[in-house]
Amino acid sequence: MSDKPLSVEEQLVKARTLSEALPYMHRFNGQTFVIKYGGHAMGDDELSHLFARDVALMKQVGINPVIVHGGGPQIGNMLDRLKIKSSFVDGLRVTDKETVEIAEMVLSGSLNKKIVTSINEAGGLAIGLSGKDGNLIEAQKLTRTKRDPDSNIERILDLGFVGEPSRINPEILESFEENNLIPVIAPIGVGSNGQTFNINADTAAGHIAAALGATKLIMMTDVEGVLDKNKKLINRLTPAEVRKLQKDGTIAGGMIPKLETCLYALEEGVESATILDGRIPHVLLLETFTEHGVGTMITEATE
Ligand SMILES: Nc1ncnc2c1ncn2[C@@H]1O[C@H](COP(=O)(O)OP(=O)(O)O)[C@@H](O)[C@H]1O
Ligand SMILES: CC(=O)N[C@@H](CCC(=O)OP(=O)(O)O)C(=O)O
């Protein structure tokens, strides 16, 4: 913050901005927003600090923010340091025994605590947990098939310890809300025999949003939003339009699980899913307290 006094005009702009936020504060009071904070979006310290402030502000004005974080690039860095090779299939990391241990260490350990600390420093009260705590995310091995384009044979893919949520037990999150705590969740799931599963953070966020009956699912990433074939931002999409983009190959890599999750969340009753550019300062406030103008919003009906 600069110490230079503001001109009257600048003060008026500030006052107007605050006043314009009032209807949104009323509209969203008491509602749950699940915010997926992607590993790419958390690379810059200044942006991470602004993210934490935005989350603390949301909580202060009566919204219930629930953070689910990723950490793909950070897991990748640790695997590189340990000289462990890693690969992805359709945006999902092939996860062997060693890799799942590293993923848990990075996600539930250093990254989770870093986010908790920065929200606490910003004046919120955050609590970190993984899907193992309170049995929040019960998971099973993900089963995936892929059609071989040459032979047209459907093959079963074995991604190792990659999990998908089989049941979410949100009671622990509800008790946090009652106590004004902001949950920060690492996407690690627990299997029926206590196994650890590495879950794509988008998938975890979508299931948590559905189980909590969230109003909004917000995905923060490192692109403007969903881009069309000419790399132009698409502002609004319906589920039918998303399916078309999936079929014609416009959607690739990490955007595949992201959009699958958005569709799942909408089917389960979440009102809107938005993919936002986490590189924009205060993008969460822009999304929450102004008419939609950034990123891609997916809703059942377009106005
Ligand atoms: N049509 C598309 N529009 C936008 N991004 C796309 C598209 N298709 C593929 N992508 C890729 O998806 C990436 C976002 O997914 P990902 O890297 O998993 O992000 P995060 O780590 O934030 O979850 C983009 O950086 C981009 O490379
Ligand atoms: C199965 C799987 O792919 N798990 C992810 C979990 C982290 C994640 O999803 O992080 P981002 O949101 O930053 O991509 C991984 O190992 O990278």
Image (spheres, rainbow, N blue to C red):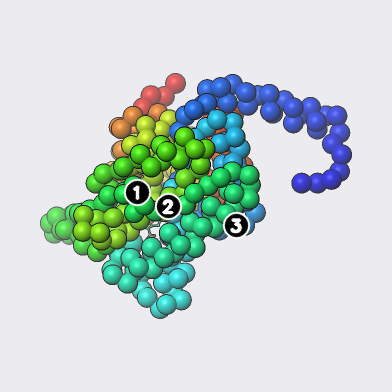
| Nearer to the camera, 66 or 237 | 66
Q: CA–CA distance between discs 2 and 3?
A: 23 Å
Please say whether residue 112 is visible from this viewpoint: yes
* Residue named by callout 1: 134
Q: Quadrant of residue 141?
A: bottom left
Name which residue lies at 63% across and 47% down.
122
Name which residue lies at 47% across and 29% down.
31
Q: Residues within 10 Å of mark 1 (few under 14, many from 20)?
A: some
| Nearer to the camera, 91 or 80 | 80
Q: Name the amino acid type tagged 2.
A: Leu
Name which residue lies at 46% across and 36% down.
177
The kind of secondary structure element at disc 3 is loop
Total marks in image: 3
Q: Name the amino acid type tagged 1.
A: Gly
Horizontal relation, residue 73 to residue 16: left or right? left
Q: Do the numbered discs 1 and 2 sit on residues whose CB atoms are within 8 Å?
A: yes
Q: Do the numbered discs 3 and 1 sit on residues whose CB atoms are within 8 Å?
A: no
| Nearer to the camera, 206 or 292 | 206
Horizontal relation, residue 21 to residue 150: left or right? right
The kind of secondary structure element at disc 2 is strand
Horizontal relation, residue 150 to residue 105: left or right? left
Which of the labelled discs sits on residue 44, or is there none? 3
Q: Which percent across, then down, holds residue 245? A: 34, 41
Which of the labelled discs sits on residue 129, or is there none? 2
